[in-house]
């Protein structure tokens, strides 16, 4: 079997390469995770008995053409024209970049990933981002996929409940843990409230 001919495939922004009998296109993203430049790769496997198999990989996530094709379309072919269409389709959506967190924290699912996100074009951008253990590569809108969006919503609710509990604890603060200045201020405030209650 001869090696794939890449001369008939032209997709701006993507670099074509060969890997044995496979053809792939790679694109360097403009952001890094943990200091490593993010690379998106689309590989076509021509040795599948059921037709061409397209595999998309980027920052630890892998999806196949089953993710973005419908059964009505039928099998994907091995034509260069279709390869260009697949690459063009991938170019049209956003990649999940997780969501921003203040710190790695505790109590999270250990399978979730926390990485340092930096921008290649803006050195001032450096932040921690969390990815759901079930994160999907594609996001239809925004900067994170549905799974990461759901995780962010859960974490925001958890943080809200935590702050609420902290406020309740502070309102019933045990006097023995207060400093002399805090205790004196509290006694004065209670005395003032009692006087206002009698007035």
Image (cartoon, grey):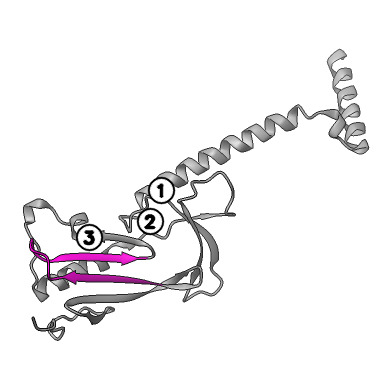
Please state which of the two labelled residues, at mark 1 or mark 3, is closer to the viewer. Answer: 3
Identify the mark at residue 64; answer none if there is no mark.
3
Label 1: how many Cα within 10 Å (few below 14, some 14–19, many 20+):
many
The residue under label 2 is 142
The residue under label 1 is 149
Please state which of the two labelled residues, at mark 2 or mark 3, is closer to the viewer. Answer: 3
- 135 vs 34, left or right, is left
**Residue 9 in the image: x percent, y percent?**
15, 80
Q: Secondary structure at mark 1?
A: helix
Label 2: how many Cα within 10 Å (few below 14, some 14–19, many 20+):
few
**Residue 76 in the image: x percent, y percent?**
9, 63
Quadrant into which the N terminus falls: bottom left
Identify the mark at residue 66; answer none if there is no mark.
none
Q: Camera-side residue: 16 or 97?
A: 16
Q: Camera-side residue: 1 or 53?
A: 1
**Residue 160 in the image: x percent, y percent?**
57, 38
Residue at figure coordinates x 46%, y 70% from the top left: 32
- 121 vs 184, left or right, is left
Residue at figure coordinates x 38%, y 62% from the top left: 60
Q: Secondary structure at mark 2?
A: loop
Q: Which residues are magenta?
A: 38-58
Residue at figure coordinates x 13%, y 83% from the top left: 3
Q: Is residue 99 above or below residue 25?
A: above
């Amino acid at each position: 079997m001869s090696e794939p001919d890449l001369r008939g495939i032209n997709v701006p922004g993507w670099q074509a390469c060969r890997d044995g009998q496979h053809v792939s296109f790679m694109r360097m993203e403009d952001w890094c995770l943990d200091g490593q430049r993010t690379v998106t790769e689309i590989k076509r496997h021509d040795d599948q008995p059921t037709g061409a198999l397209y595999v998309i990989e980027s920052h630890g996530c892998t999806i196949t053409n089953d993710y973005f094709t419908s059964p009505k379309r039928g099998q994907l072919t091995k034509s260069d024209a279709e390869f260009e269409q697949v690459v063009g389709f991938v170019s049209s959506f956003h990649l999940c970049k997780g969501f921003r967190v203040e710190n790695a924290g505790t109590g999270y699912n250990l399978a979730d990933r926390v990485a340092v996100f930096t921008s290649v074009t803006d050195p001032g951008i450096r932040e921690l981002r969390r990815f759901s253990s079930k994160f999907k590569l594609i996001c239809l809108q925004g900067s994170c996929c549905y799974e990461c969006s759901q995780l962010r919503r859960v974490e925001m609710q958890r943080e809200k409940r935590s702050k609420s509990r902290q406020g309740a604890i502070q309102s019933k603060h045990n006097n023995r843990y207060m400093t002399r200045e805090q205790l004196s201020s509290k006694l004065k405030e209670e005395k003032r409230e009692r006087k206002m209650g009698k007035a």
